[in-house]
């Protein structure tokens, strides 16, 4: 989790669920493109592939502008009993937001770096992949540098969501990640991610465990990988994510 200010290596929000507490340097633009494959056997046998994409642009030394989209989505569902299969494809919704880096870390006192991320998700997607109304969210990221090249990140948050029947509800989120920097260009991580904490009628709690790694190709390019398994029966079974990130 290196500082992204001028002269330092790229610092990405992925491939881990917990995002970075740093912002993109003023005047720089960063692109993070994922390919995500998810398998869900909770009801139907559903396989989904999507291409989430995040664009970050540094406005000041402590503030960045963000545009994030689910990208293109392909979904295949099959009923276990009948074997009837259906296919859908389309574009997902888009979020617009800001990240504010409010505090720098201090390794000497173990005080964390802290950022705040506010997003507003808009129903820009195609039918079948389009949400209902504007859905705001707010999350905070705190990261600590620890001995032995370890770093701990915590990301709590809250979001205002909409069910398929139009009912609005408030949900929480939480992520905890432990990073290990093995070399200047290579890190691994283990993580507990809870993207939704809600009542059962609002979709319940979604939670998974994951591991992953990131490799710096050079100061401005990185590739990453994350594999996840469900932590409860309410969560899609498995997920695999591949990411390419570049800074310009």
Image (cartoon, rainbow, N blue to C red):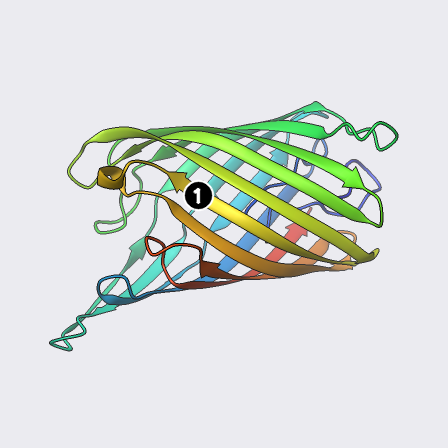
Residue found at x 59% / y 48%: 31
Where is residue 76 shown, x and y percent of the image?
27, 68
Residue found at x 18% / y 34%: 166
Residue found at x 17% / y 71%: 79
Residue found at x 11% / y 76%: 82
Where is residue 20 shown, x and y percent of the image?
64, 40
Please determine whether, in this image, residue 79 is positioned above or below residue 218.
Answer: below
**Left or right relative to 225: residue 106:** right
- Determine the image quadrant of residue 48: bottom left
- Determine the image quadrant of residue 61: top right
Name the residue at the right extreme.
108
Name the residue at the bottom extreme.
83
Name the residue nearer the viewer: 81 or 167.
81
**Left or right relative to 168: residue 173:** right
Label 1 belongs to which residue? 195
Please determine whether, in this image, residue 73 is positioned above or below residue 192.
Answer: below
Is residue 147 at least partly visible in the picture? yes
Please determine whether, in this image, residue 187 is positioned above or below residue 154.
Answer: below
């Amino acid at each position: 989790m290196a500082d992204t200010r001028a002269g330092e290596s790229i610092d990405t929000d992925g491939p881990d669920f917990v995002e970075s507490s740093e912002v993109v340097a003023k005047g720089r633009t960063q692109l993070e493109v994922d390919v995500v494959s998810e398998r869900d056997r909770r009801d139907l046998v559903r396989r989904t592939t999507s291409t989430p994409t995040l664009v970050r642009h540094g406005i000041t030394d402590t503030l960045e502008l963000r545009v994030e989209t689910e990208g293109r989505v392909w979904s295949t569902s099959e009923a276990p009993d009948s074997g009837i299969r259906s296919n859908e494809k389309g574009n997902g919704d888009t979020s617009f937001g800001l990240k504010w880096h409010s505090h720098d870390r201090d390794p000497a006192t173990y005080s964390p770096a802290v950022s705040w991320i506010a997003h507003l998700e808009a129903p820009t997607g195609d039918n079948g992949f389009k949400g209902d109304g504007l859905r705001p969210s707010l999350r905070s990221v705190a990261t600590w540098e620890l001995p032995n090249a370890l770093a701990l990140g915590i990301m709590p948050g809250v979001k205002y969501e909409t069910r398929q029947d139009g009912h609005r509800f408030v949900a929480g989120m939480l992520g905890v990640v432990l990073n290990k920097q093995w070399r200047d260009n290579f890190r691994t991580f283990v993580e507990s991610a809870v993207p939704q904490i809600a009542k059962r009628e609002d979709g319940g709690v979604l939670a998974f465990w994951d591991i992953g790694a990131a490799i710096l190709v050079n100061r401005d390019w990185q590739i990453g990988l994350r594999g996840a398994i469900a932590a409860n029966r309410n969560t899609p079974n498995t997920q695999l994510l591949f990411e390419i990130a570049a800074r310009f």
